[in-house]
Image (cartoon, grey):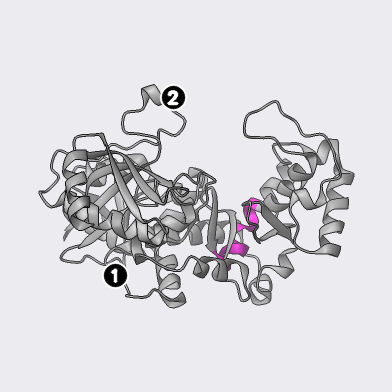
Amino acid sequence: MRCSQTEGRSVTVKLSLAQARRIALAAQGFGDRRHATPTLRTFSRTMARTGVLQIDSVNVLQRAHYMPLFSRMGPYDTGLLARASEQAPRRMVEYWAHVAAFMPVELWPYMGHRMRHYRERGHAWTIMRHNPKLVDALLAEVRERGASTPRDLDDGLPRAKTHWGWNWSDTKKALEYLFFTGELAIAGRNAAFERLYDLPERVIPAHVLAQPAPTDAQAHIELVRRAAISHGIATEACLRDYYRMHHDHSRPALAALVEAGELLPAAVEGWPRPAYLHRDARLPRRIDARALLSPFDPVVWERERTERLFGFHYRIEIYVPEHKRRHGYYVLPFLLGDRLVARVDLKADRKAGVLVVRSAHAEAQAPAETAPALAAELRALAGWLGLSDIRVERRGGLASALRAAVRLAG
């Protein structure tokens, strides 16, 4: 890493691609040593690195918000997440931070500008326009009875069946509107993964709700700041995407952070756009990671960034017809050291107690130790999921070597 003088008095930090990778992975927690038994303190440290945990309903392996924690901490008690998000004092709460995601609870005030936007614009489902009385009635009902699902409150109104996957009653639409606008918060989820809606004062700690509301500009700066801490090194587009901001908001915030010296202009080898280095970002001499990354992991969710950092072309093929899929349905990249060296399509067959590897593909420059390292990580994943065996099917160029490594490791 070196600095060069550019226009005026500004300084540009020059980074090799390998340095940028190590900075990015350290910022995400892959430079931290795993604890033998992860605790709530370990959880909090990891959450501080990622900033958000994206939520997704697909459960073919494990729900998306659990996986980034496993990737960084190793096998952990998933009850830690429930404790942090459902028990007082809550450490995190659900909101539309990236998309639907868990975020640190102290970010709640910084989402106020989004809540106002939804209130002023009206929700996409236009529930306020065609049935405002239902919204008011449901808010009063939740106030009286406490945390509730739409099913708890639904009065039998017909459910629309015109769109696959969106079989929602008017009750559900109204509750979602109130959640978007911040008039309700999410107290947790039940065993069916349904949201439990409740009043913010019964979910968000009182000291957080008592904070002065930040201005829109202050909120934008805070979100870009947090994105920069979680990325370590990033372009403006990467920073903007982390909390799904509009460039009209992210660019002035970025300029303010550069002016304050919190972000340093940087140039990364091979990157066509300017980058920005957080002033506190670590550049370790090496990264010794071994991790399977969920399709919704912050390391890989911005696909262009993944390709620039790792030379790894990655797409989610869940919604691609089976005969057109290249790698599989639920494909996880495999991180070894500071490189993405392979990818595996995984499924948890819970009835049979088997972790199924439907396909296994190695990258062109994958090292010789890829198969045994991947087998060890699959064994750890299977144990964490409560699965007693691993079955490697025949699809993919790495499948044969991985099958032998799994057999040897078992």
x and y percent of residue 151 in the render?
76, 48
Quadrant, the C terminus: bottom left
Residue linked to disc 2: 321
Residue linked to disc 1: 32
Drawn side of residue 67 relative to residue 123, left or right: left
Furthest-top residue in view?
323
Residue 156 image-quadrant placement: top right
Quadrant, the N terminus: bottom left
x and y percent of residue 271 in the render?
24, 43
Drawn side of residue 322 relative to residue 244, left or right: left
Residue type marked 1? Asp
Residue at (27% x, 40% y) in the render: 307
Pick the residue in front: 72 or 13.
72
Where is 121 relative to 107, above or below? Answer: above
Pick the residue in front: 289 or 353.
353
Residue type marked 2? Pro
